[in-house]
Amino acid sequence: MRLEQTILKNLIKDKDYTRKVLPFLKEEYFGNMEDRLLFKEVADFLLKYGEQPTFDALDIEINNIRGTTDDTVKSMRETLKELNNDTEKTNPDWLLDNTEKFCQEKAIYNAITSSLEIMNGKGKQAKGAIPSLLSDALAISFDPNVGHDYIENAVERYDYYHRVEERIPFDLEYFNKITKNGIPKKTLNIVMAGVGVGKSLTLCHFASGYINQGKNVLYISMELAEPEVAKRIDANVLNVSLDDLMVLPKDIYEKKIETLKQKTNGKLIVKEYPTASASTVHFRSLLNELNLKKGFVPDVIMVDYLNICASARIKPGNGVNSYTYIKAIAEELRGLAVEYNVPIWSATQLTRGGYGSTDPDLTDTSESFGLPATADFFVALIVTEQLEQLNQIMVKQLKNRYADPSRYKRDVIGVDKTRMKLYDIEQSAKDIVDTGEDIPQPKPKFENKNKFKGLKV
């Protein structure tokens, strides 16, 4: 008996096996037309009725199939009869392993075939989708976990509640306060501002802070040249104004860099791509190359900035609107963050209407509301004439999956554009009051440390 037939037999007879493998099996994996049609009937029955079909029921369904020849129906009925008469039990572990291998090999074959069609201009997807097709096929693996059992997994759930999530902190008090001391891994974090307000400055400041913490930072620039990004980092980390940096003697500059090397083991790699030409396909290739050639693995990735990246899945034009396109880029970046277990920072523009607003919200996101829908953390940078005169910038949180976004909704921080720095300022020097601290919070029901002592269960 062929493996395809063994799979079909156990789909009909073995409920536990079916539960494990049905989500991974596809019609196109069965090369034989009769096997493919029979699988479709079995799968349709399972999805519709929630239980295994009997052989009699399948025999009736086969007779009702339209668009097939009498010879095909006859062959299917003979196969079904053969499966029914086979009473020999198959080793479940062997069957599961070989079914997984079967799915992997078929998926890889189909991915290669689709990739060749794309290369020949016959596919519907862009060429950038090829690595994704292949990686998805190679990633097929049967997952024994079928969900969280509320009762049976209670202890694991309790441990999850009390697990301390690893976060990368900021050197700014306000950002630590609204994120519960930093951003977690596998997240997409966005800074939104108008033209010239300070998106790149903020990303460069965060990158500098991470370097000082000993973190490895990959800074991907879609508009600034690599030396220009490094210059901004220099101004921040070395605490030298951009103008002074241009006239700084070489020996003093080298001494400052040497002091920095002794102070931190954090590394920075800056990579420039032409505007709108690079996608997560290029970023993934860069990450693998950096690891292979330099042993460099980033702790944080900065992408400056999201709206001028390319999508790996969707070709621009051909009726594709900006909402769909930018949302696709955001989803791909967040997927990259999850795949490489790092937080990603990027930026976006305000709309024309939001640019002049002193109180922008998520609807003022340029080009696509799909971006804030995908992001984990989203803040707006606001500058007024008065704030600019005070060398201050207002930060307003618009979306926050790390803490309650209604707490500490906005605050003001200092900005030194000559040194590409952000810094904390005293409350008395701020133009606004952080009203989030004044929101009354409900008092806990129990006030002492032994509040659960004697609690009946």
Image: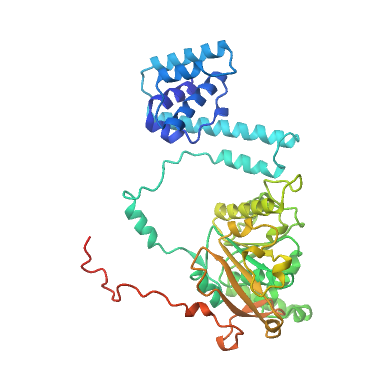
Quadrant where the C terminus lies?
A: bottom left
x, y percentage for residue 416?
Answer: 68, 80
- The relative height of residue 62 versus residue 425 in the rendered view (above or below) is above
- The residue sitting at the right extreme is 247
Judging depth in this view, the residue of 448 and 300 nearest the camera is: 448
Rendering colour mode: rainbow
Between 272 and 117, the residue placed more toward the observer is 117
Q: Position of residue 15 (x, y in %)?
A: 38, 30
Q: Residue at x 72, y 82 (%)?
A: 385
Total label count? 0
Reply above or below: 74 against 281. above
- Determine if residue 289 is in view: no
Nearer the observer, 77 or 244: 77
Q: Quadrant of residue 30?
A: top right
Residue at left 56%, top 83%?
Answer: 433
Q: Position of residue 367 (x, y in %)?
A: 70, 58
The residue that appears at 76% across and 47% down in the rendered structure is 317
Residue pictured at 75% horizontal, 67% vertical: 227
Q: Quadrant of residue 392?
A: bottom right
Q: Is residue 417 visible?
A: yes
Q: Position of residue 115 (x, y in %)?
A: 68, 36
Splitting the image into 4 quarters, where does residue 28 fall?
top right
